[in-house]
Amino acid sequence: MHGKQLVKKFAIDPEKLEELTIEAMGVDSIEMLNDAMVNKVGDLTANQIVTGKVLRILDDGTVVIDVQYKSEGRIPLAEFDDPDSVKVGEEVEALIEAIHDEDGHISLSKRKADRIRGWERIIETHKEGDVVKGDVQRKIKGGLLVDIGVPVFLPASQVNIRRTGDIGEWIGKEIEARIIKIDEERMNIVISRRKLIEEERERLKTNLLSEIEEGQVRTGVVKNIADFGVFVDLGGLDGLLHITDMSWGRISHPSDMVAIDEQVEVKVLKIDRERERIALGMKQKQASPWEEIDTKFPISGRVTGEVVNLMSYGAFVKLEDGVEGLVHISEMSWTKRVNHPSEVVSVGDQVEVVVLEVNPEKQEISLGMKQTEVNPWNMVSDNYPPGTIIRGRVRNLTNYGAFIELQEGIDGLLHITDMSWTKKITHPSEVVKKSEEIECVVLSVDQEKKRIALGLKQLQADPWASDIPARYHIGDSVPGSVTKITNFGVFVELELGLEGLLHVSELADHKVENPEEVVKVGQKVEVRIIKIDTEERKIGLTLIQTHFESAEAEVGGQPEPEAVARSPLGSLATQLKDLGERVSKREAAADQPEGSDDAVASAPEVEAPSEALETAPAVETADVAPEAEAKAEEPKAVEPKAEEPAASSDEPAADEPPKPEASDA
């Protein structure tokens, strides 16, 4: 209650109240008391620090303070560091926030007064660069709030050398840091624990590098763990403990062996003082299991191990702690084509292997699984000697042949050239199909290269040995069908599976740029054999005549095949055609009334063809006669009289040069 309310409540006489007041205040009069109070209160202003005494503590947690003012000051009990230790009569410093609050009291703040006094003390006793200690109070945006007498800011980047995941773990801990910035105007101080640590580590690093040597065993603290290894603080400098130097055995991750802040004992492997790098090892503290490895695992020896890892190129087998060998994918099976080790083994399998090679320097051991079994290729030469007729399944087709499975894992190659004696095979699918069972003969076995050559055509006699030379001779005229046209000539099928080559130079008298100008695929032709090579299995041909069966020219109501003839056959055929026409004229003249003798006499040109034939280049008349007869029949049937000129072509004059061989024709 205020003073006036108390007076009214107790009904005190004003004069009596004045006497009691003068007596209580120790003054001579009320006027003197008023003057004293005015002078004293006039010094109090907002934001001023005053000293007062604790009068009492109210039940609502408010501390009443006498600041020698007509109104009492009040401070929340929560602003005291230890509320339970607050006692009546104790002097405290507080900051005036407001002279008259809504209840007519003076609003005070002890916390703000303490901060101002603490700031003043810090400024008086510290400067930038000084080392201070304080308690981490709480986590704020961007860092931590630390109490060193006043709250100061510790940025998250300055908490430690390596930034930790959660800086909140420092709350409640006492830390030592260096002041890096003071802002008096804003009453702000920034500190750095990292800078202090770096300075200390620099000193320790200098001492460490001066005394550390390779081969020493030292104790350090694990500061960081990565996939490739562990960083160990040796006291001023971190060393790298690589994952391969942690154990002689296989470990999947460094965290399997160590943890952060764990103290470990390591051996110094290598020191680079210029780059300030140290390589450490843990397994080197023990003897290497690779010592005397040749004695423990001799070559060709059989051992049992556990599959610990699979790669695309093979499987790693653990023989003992710290010793692993590689079974290459090519050493897993004698016959099966293994695309991945997982087709044969799995991690954790116990397998029997044979030691193939040991390299102690590189710490490598080559192992084999197939060597524990009998190599079926060792029996191939006995099971499939050359000349053996076998039956197998076509497993695969390639451009150059077909692979025939003789038994599981053993294939033989049926090359494209061994499929037919006479037919030109461009792809094996023309003869065999995949998965088809066929019969072949073994031609050769190369046990070292693991190859078996097979033949299909060898099941039959070679027609080039006797049959073809017996039925085809140089100079023979034979019919054929064009099967293929190339830029160098035309292939003509003489019979099923037998072809001859009609070279481009044998197509016409003139130079032929494109063989298709003369013949077409599927066209029937008549050719002469000019060469038979049994060793090369080739027949050379020259063109006599082509037949265009689809295009018929009607002459006298009969289809006449169009002829393309080569010299001298072309000119000879023309002469024979003229001969037929002249014979027809002579017969027509014989029918005239003047008499047959005069009619014959009037056609002396009939003898001309005989002379023309005698002077023509020598050719094999036996081959020309059929053409001549065909030509002579075109206009009209010739009577026996017309055979006289033809007979002269079969009986050459005495001075006619000898006939050339068929190969010269």
Image: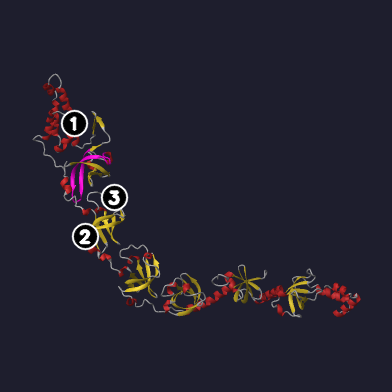
Residue at 25% in and 49% down = 424
- Disc ID at residue 430: 3
Horizontal relation, residue 84 to residue 38: left or right: left
Could you say which is closer to the camera, residue 375 or residue 525? 375
Amino acid of disc 2: Pro
**Which element is circle 2 on?**
loop
Residue under label 1: 633
Residue 83 x, y percent position in the rendering:
71, 77
Q: Which quarter of the image is occupied by the C terminus?
A: top left
Mark 1 belongs to which amino acid?
Answer: Glu
Q: CA distance from mark 1 to mark 2?
A: 61 Å
Ranked by sequence position, the earlier of labels 2 and 3 is 2
Q: Nearer the viewer, mark 1 or mark 3?
A: 3
**Dot in front, 1 or 2:** 2
Where residue 275 sits: x, y (%)? 47, 72
Marks 1,2: beta carbons within 8 A: no
Q: Which mark is residue 386?
A: 2
Helix, strand or loop for disc 1: helix
Q: Residue type at mark 3? A: Glu
